[in-house]
Amino acid sequence: MTITPEILSQFNEIIGNSFVFTDKETRNHYGKDETEDYVFPPSVLLKPATPEEIAAILKIANLHTIPVTAIGARTGLSGGALSVHQGIGLSMERFNKILNIDEQNLQVTVEPAVITQVLREAVAEKDLFYPPDPSSLGSCWIGGNVAENAGGARAVKYGVTKDYVLNLEVVLANGEIIWTGANTLKNSTGYNLTQLMVGSEGTLGIITKIVMKLIPKNTHTVLMLVPFYNANEACEAVSAIFRAGITPSALEFM
């Protein structure tokens, strides 16, 4: 579907023309991530700032059958942010706020463009801990972590992103804005839409708010570097550690 001047005019009305980009340089910049040297620029790049703006954009895209690709920090290695069908590139970079840290219930509500390390440091100031630690921790966004179900070295003890997502605000393809779950540790009402969205890479809807559970911050940490003469011995040591009933917060083989 060609994006006509009339459709572009509608986008301008929704988010303002300063957040609608059709120039080649910008489209190419947002048409690549860390997936090798691929470049798949969208036909137009949009930078909305509210769920309602995204809803209005998706209604137009749905009406005219225009492909939409959610674009985050572009640090991914699986091509999830590439606009392989052109259409609309939907940059989430203006959704960059930590909305609430609930110390009483060990939860945080955050927008998707918050850098994962920034989130971790913010909750650490409240003596809370967000364990998942993808390798691009200092540059990736929490929304991308949810979309890709990111893990990291601490997954061995604490699990991956899906284990910390309680609830999501999502804009569906028809423009409807929904919450997928509840801000509780157990919610058995209806289908588990929250976990359906985690790892879906933006194919089922656009995530605009994330409620995540936290745990108390560790009071003591010990780092060990252990040399081995061969890889087999190193692997045997990992098995021996777990058989001894010890679950380290992270294990990395170098």
Image (cartoon, rainbow, N blue to C red):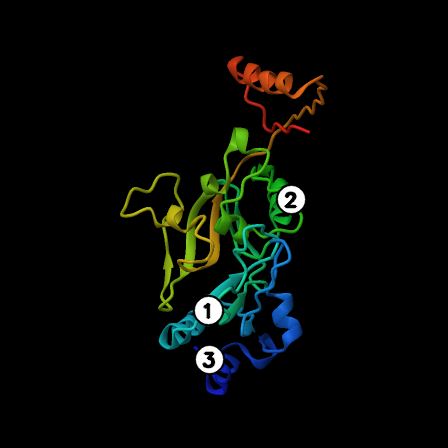
**Which dot marks residue 54?**
1
Q: What distance separates the C-alpha of mark 3 from that of mark 2?
A: 44 Å
The quadrant of the rendering that contains the N terminus is bottom left
Amino acid on which the number 1 mark rests in the picture: Ile
SS class of the residue under badge 3? loop
Q: Residue at x 50, y 38 (%)?
A: 160
* Quarter placement of the C terminus: top right
- Name the N-terminal-most of marks 1 and 2: 1
Give the crowd class for mark 3: few <14, some 14-19, many >=20 residues within 10 Å.
few
Taking depth in this image into account, of 113 and 204 the one nearest to the observer is 204
Pointer 2: what residue?
121
User: Which residue shows up at 57% across the image and 16% down it?
Assistant: 241
The amino acid beneath tag 3 is: Thr
Residue at horizontal 50 percent and vertical 62 percent from the top: 70
Residue 192 drawn at (x, y percent) = 33, 46
Q: For the residue labelled by badge 1, is the local secondary structure a helix, a strand or a loop? A: helix
Which image quadrant is residue 249 in? top right
Q: Nearer the viewer, mark 3 or mark 2?
A: 3
Residue 230: quarter of image = top right
Residue with the mark numbered 3: 2
Counting residues from the N terminus, which is met first, the one under dot 3 or under dot 2?
Answer: 3
Residue at the spot 54% in from the left edge and 75% down from the top edge: 44
Q: Would you place residue 128 above or below residue 19 in this image? A: above
